[in-house]
Structure formats: structure tokens, C-alpha cells
Amino acid sequence: MKRIFISAIILCTMIQAQAQSFNFAFGQKSKTATNITAADSFSVEKGYGYDFINIPRKAAAPFYFSVNVPDGNYKVTVRLGSKKAKASTSVRAESRRLFVENVATKKGEFKEFSFVVNKRDTKISDGSVVKIKPREKNKLNWDDKLTIEFNGDAPAVSEMKIERIDNVPTVYLIGNSTVVDQDFEPWASWGQMITRWFDDGISFANYAESGERASSFIGANRFKKIHSLLKKGDYVFIEFGHNDQKEKGPGKGAYYNFSTHLKEMTDMARAKGATVIFVTPTQRRSFDKNGKIKETHGDYPDAMRAVAKRENVQVIELHDMTRTFYETMGVENSKKAFVHYKKGSFPGMDKDMEDNTHFNPYGAYELAKCIIEGMKQLNLPLLKNLREDYKPFNPAQPDDVSTFKWNNSPFIDVQKPDGN
């Protein structure tokens, strides 16, 4: 009986390990991988397949591939290219997190890339759950699937391996709509772009959500979920201020309610051995008559700095860097970093869009580089995982917007995200 029991444990362990490691071959016959054909659509029973697209998919169109996996970090290795034609491929994961950017391959040429994707659901180990908003229930970040998006002028993948990885530090991102993984074009945030610049030795877990304040983030169990997963060597980046300043009533305010919640999250994260980094809130695109950015966040940036000083927390001054970035671009040209589009630019868009808080992909891409420069100023150890193709960035000398190339994802929503 004991031998049977031990054998059962071993079998269960083997099945679990197998379920967290996958190897797929696309459009070819492989003896070592699961062969995927054009007709392999996702099903819960099968646990993997093409997702969110019509089968068979159109040539040169973006496509998604999903795999059912438990919560955790997964190393994804993709072999991009095709034997039949030249290709140009970008790889994103979950809700448009950018990992591989505009990789060109000739006919018969292949290039391999590895990165780590964090996958999560709403369940917490003590039986409670994250209280997500109704609209989040349709998001790719809060389900049972790990979803990879292949996009670009002519996306092509020949092989993909997915394997559970537990020995990498995780960088948890906490914040609002300026940080969140925006699901829909033309919206974007720095939290879903920063993944582009790091190798497979680190994971980014973006828990930010539109409209959140420090208090509501805690109240919805979002931080509780993070806390349940934190381990020594992880990081917690916290950016709040946009929505917090709208809280009114007794006990509210930058130096009381807001500061108290910042300290609470800091203490809890440090108790788990994690490093906390504060990120001062991004500026709004609000210019005065002299072409200078107006300060619209009240006492909140200074309150964050005050807590950081008392608690010995390092700070990335995104508030200052974004001021420089917007003023350098100028009153009119800075619109190209935000969701400013003319009527008809996207399906269902029946009026002009003029949002001075939320970024488009170019703006989010530039802000991600600001965050990395802030990491460099603090000399954070995680910079050892910065990819070799990252080039130093100066917000006073931003990238030329005309050189930025982004292929839109199929999902589009002209409804403005929560928060301002």
C-alpha cells in the first residue's frame, strides 16, 4: 500500500511538471514538440491552441496562442521566422506586454528569443479573491490562460517552448491607468512596455489598474494577492497620485490617508524580503501660456517623497522626467505621445479623442525608458538583466516619433479608461 501511495505521488508530480512545460512546433512536423496546424483552435479540454481569431487565420495577420497554466512565472522561448517567406514579427503577451520588437527574418532564416511572462488569476492562497472590476473579467490578465500575441508586418513563429520558472526575481508594478497593461488600442502604459528591455532572468508582474488609488488597491485585495506571492529578492514599484488626489472627506489627503497606505504596503513588502521603489506620478499634459507644464498633482508627489525619506525608500522621479519630456516635445508635438486622434482614426470613433493623461504606444514606450533611467540613477541590481540592445535615454532628447513602429493589436476601444 505504501509503495502504491508513493507511486501515485510521483505520478501526480510528473503530470503537474508536464502540464507546466510545453513545446510547440508551428506548421511543421516535429518529433520532439506538439505539432500545431492552422486548424488548432483553443479549447479548455485540449488546454492550448490559437485564440481570439478566426480559424484558419489570414496570412500576415496578427494571431494569438493560449495555453492553460497555473499562476506563476513562465520562460517563453520563441523561434521566429519561416522557411517559406520573409517575416517581421513582434511578440507580446497577456494584455499587450511587449517582449520582442519588429524582428525581421529572411526566407529560411530564424532568430530565437527568450523572456519571462507572469501569469495570474484572481485566487489568493487563503481562499479570498481579488475583487476585479466588471470590465476586467474580459481581460487577458485575470484568467487561467497564458496568452502570447504574434504581431508585426508579417508575423511568423516556427517553435515556442513554455516552461515554469521559479528562481527569478519578480518586479510587481502597483499603480493606476498610467501603469496598467492597457488591453485596447490606442491606449498604452509604461508597465506593458518596460518588459521589452529585460532578459529572461527577471519577471514583471503588472497589477496596476485604471482608476485605482492606494486605498482602493488595498481594499480590492490587489496588494493582498501580491503579498501572498512575494519572496526575498522581489521588487515592488509603487506609482500613485493621479486618482488619490480626488479623495475627499475626513482622514483623506496626501499627508494622512495616502501616506499611511504607502507606508502600509512598504512595511508588508519589506517583511517578505522585497525591495520597495516609489515612482512619483507622471505629469499630465497641461501647459501654461509659456509652454511649461503646470503642476496638477497638489501635495501628492511631495507626500510620496516625504514617506520615502522617513522610511528610506528609493524614488524614481518620473514626475520630473515627464515634465522634461513633454516640455521638450512642445505644446503641439507632445500630443503625439498621448491619445490625441482625429475622428475616424479607429473603428467606432465618431469624434476626436483628446486625452491628456493616457498615453498611446509611443508615449508609453518613452516613459518605460524614463523608468529604466530612474533605475540606473538608483543603481538597482536588476539592471544586470537589461538587454544589450537598450541604449541610454534622455527625456530631454526623446526618440523621434516618426521612427517608432507599432502594429496595432486587433482589440480596439475608443472608451477612455478610468482615472484622469
Image (cartoon, rainbow, N blue to C red):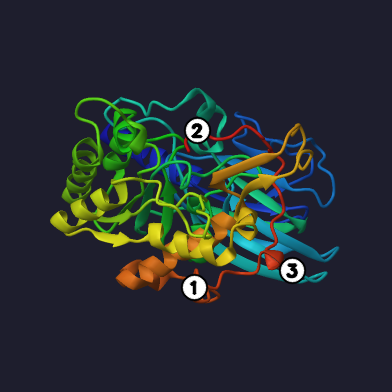
Between disc 2 and disc 3, whose residue precedes?
3
Residue 313 in picture, x, y percent from top left: 21, 58
Q: Nearer the viewer, residue 245 or 373?
A: 245
Residue 201's quadrant in the figure? bottom left
Viewport quadrant of the N terminus:
top left
Between disc 1 and disc 2, whose residue precedes?
1
Q: Residue at x 40, y 38 (%)?
A: 12
Residues at discs 2 and 3 in contact (Cβ within 8 Å):
no
The residue lying furthest to the front in this view is 289
Residue 17 in picture, x, y percent from top left: 44, 46
Q: Which residue is mark 3?
A: 104
Instruction: Give the side of residue 249 with respect to residue 51, left or right.
Output: left
Question: CA gap, disc 1 to disc 2?
Answer: 30 Å
- Amino acid type, callout 1: Asn
Q: Residue at x 73, y 34 (%)?
A: 351
Residue 80's quadrant in the figure? bottom right
Between disc 3 and disc 1, whose residue precedes?
3
Question: CA gap, disc 3 to disc 1?
Answer: 27 Å
Q: Nearer the viewer, residue 40 or 203?
A: 203
Check the image and report above or below for 182 versus 333: above
Residue 162 in picture, x, y percent from top left: 54, 52
- Amino acid type, callout 2: Asp
Q: Nearer the viewer, mark 3 or mark 1?
A: 1
Query: What numbered label is drawn on residue 418?
Result: 2
Which secondary structure, mark 1?
loop
Check the image and report above or below for 316 versus 281: below
Q: Which residue is mark 1?
A: 394
Question: Do we see residue 137 in this rendering?
Answer: yes
